[in-house]
């Protein structure tokens, strides 16, 4: 057995969901399980958190359908709403809650009126999806006149996880104004806002990354936030090479030994979803001992520094999980844990523990 594994921990997902619910202090909690449950498995994530949360958030209708087919009867919010008439009717048939973010969706609804739980999305400064507040008020009046009163108003924060955040308060103010004017519930908070801005919780929160045991912040770890790791990536040592000063390692000879030492070859690469752009110095652990990646990551293997480390062929190397914080790996790679979770391929064995 090659032994390259992803360990998924439903108990940790459940724990993290209960943390989100405690922080929400009575606001509804919709657990974001889009993108295959942030790489953890869509149905697995929903099953693990069922009972701890009020509903689930997905990006697209297809994800909602999979949940319904697996018997998930809890409310499901579709964050990108419907893409065409056919999806609009499917959303109705599956009793989904849809986000309406664009004028063309409002027009389609007015052409094909009928019962639907609509969350009107505001663009309060993210400038991605959403109607500007004045357009949203107008759209709401049109929908109300056609018998499709929206059930809520939502927006999404651009910078709630930035140390220098100067935008969230203004985004929140605009959203509160529209929700108050329409007398509708409001939903704004992602994980970062749920933790950092208690007054942004409103009537519904939409945490994602914190549920998966990762911190939204650079300055506070998941452990400091009392979150538990739900995703562990490990592989085995398949070769150990002695090296001398001046020897180089891997494609492009990007790393050169300065002293005699040992290099461990690990059976995981970008073909398994480990990021190819992880630089030398990215943390890993062998038998609980911290060490670092050296040289370029290849498709099926990567190389680590074993100098001064107790390790043998067959030993387990943790790429992230317990001894190695996934957020530190992500930072070393210039990315975020969301991307690391999502880009795991089908090749590693997936073990539910
Ligand atoms: C509309 C919406 N709400 C909530 C979330 C959850 O955000 P996070 O994973 O940062 O908590 C996302 C994720 O990107 C989102 O797109």
Image (cartoon, rainbow, N blue to C red):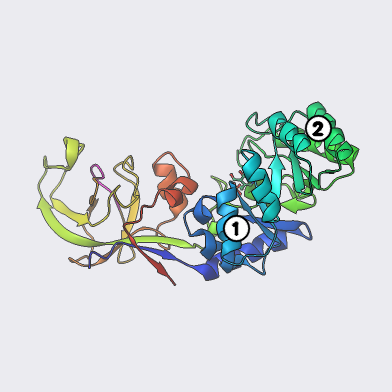
The residue at which mark 2 appears reads as: 139
Mark 2 element type: helix
Prevailing secondary structure of the magenta residues: loop
User: Is residue 80 in sight in this rendering?
Assistant: no
**Quarter where residue 81 is shown:** top right
The answer to which of 286 and 44 lies nearer the viewer is: 44
* Residue where numbered disc 1 is placed: 225
In this rendering, the answer to whether 139 lies above or below 36 is above
Q: Between residues 339 and 139, which one lies in front from this camera angle? A: 139
Q: Please determine whether, in this image, residue 233 is positioned above or below residue 163.
A: below
Residue 16 visible in image? yes
Question: Residue sitting at 21 percent across and 67 percent down?
Answer: 314
Question: Dot 1 surroundings within 10 Å: few (below 14), some, or many (20 or more)?
Answer: some
Q: Residues within 10 Å of mark 2 (few under 14, many from 20)?
A: many
Q: Report whether 257 appears left or right of 230.
A: left
Say whether disc 2 or disc 1 marks the residue closer to the N-terminus: 2
Numbered marks: total? 2
C-alpha gap between disc 2 and disc 1: 40 Å
Residue nearer the viewer, 330 or 185: 185
Part of the protein shown in magenta: 292-297
Apparent side of residue 273 relative to residue 142 in the rendered image (left or right): left
Residue 51: percent from left, percent from top: 67, 70
Is residue 151 rendered magenta in the image? no
* Residue 295 painted magenta: yes
Residue located 49% across and 62% down the image = 229
**Depth order, front residue of 154/338:** 154
């Amino acid at each position: 057995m090659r032994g390259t594994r992803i360990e998924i921990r439903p108990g940790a997902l459940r724990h993290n969901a209960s943390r989100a619910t405690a922080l929400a202090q009575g606001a509804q909690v919709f657990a974001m399980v889009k993108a295959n449950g942030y790489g953890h498995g869509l149905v697995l994530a929903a099953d693990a958190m069922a009972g701890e949360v009020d509903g689930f958030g997905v990006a697209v209708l297809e994800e909602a359908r999979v949940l319904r087919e697996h018997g998930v009867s809890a409310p499901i919010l579709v964050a990108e709403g419907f893409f065409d008439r056919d999806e609009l009717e499917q959303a109705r048939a599956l009793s989904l809650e849809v986000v309406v973010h664009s004028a063309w969706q409002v027009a389609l609804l007015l052409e094909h009126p009928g019962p639907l739980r609509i969350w009107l999305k505001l663009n309060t400064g993210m400038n991605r999806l959403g109607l500007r507040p004045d357009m949203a008020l107008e759209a709401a009046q049109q929908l109300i006149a056609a018998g499709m009163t929206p059930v809520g108003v939502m927006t999404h924060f651009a910078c709630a996880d930035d140390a220098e955040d100067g935008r969230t308060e203004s985004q929140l103010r605009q959203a509160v104004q529209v929700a108050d004017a329409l007398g509708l519930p409001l939903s704004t908070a992602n994980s970062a806002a749920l933790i950092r801005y208690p007054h942004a919780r409103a009537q519904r929160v939409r945490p994602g990354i914190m549920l998966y045991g990762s911190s939204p912040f650079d300055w506070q770890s998941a452990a400091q936030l009392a979150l538990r790791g739900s995703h562990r990536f490990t592989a085995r040592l398949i070769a150990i090479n002695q090296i001398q000063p001046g020897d180089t390692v891997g494609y492009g000879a990007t790393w050169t030994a300065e002293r005699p030492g040992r290099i461990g070859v690990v059976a995981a690469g970008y073909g398994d979803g480990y990021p190819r752009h992880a630089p030398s110095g990215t943390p890993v652990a062998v038998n609980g001992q911290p060490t670092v990646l050296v040289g370029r990551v290849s498709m099926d293997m990567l190389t680590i520094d074993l100098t001064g480390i107790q390790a043998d062929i067959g030993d387990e190397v943790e790429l992230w999980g317990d001894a190695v914080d996934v957020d530190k790996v992500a930072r070393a790679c210039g990315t975020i844990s969301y991307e690391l979770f999502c880009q795991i391929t089908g090749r590693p064995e997936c073990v539910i523990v």
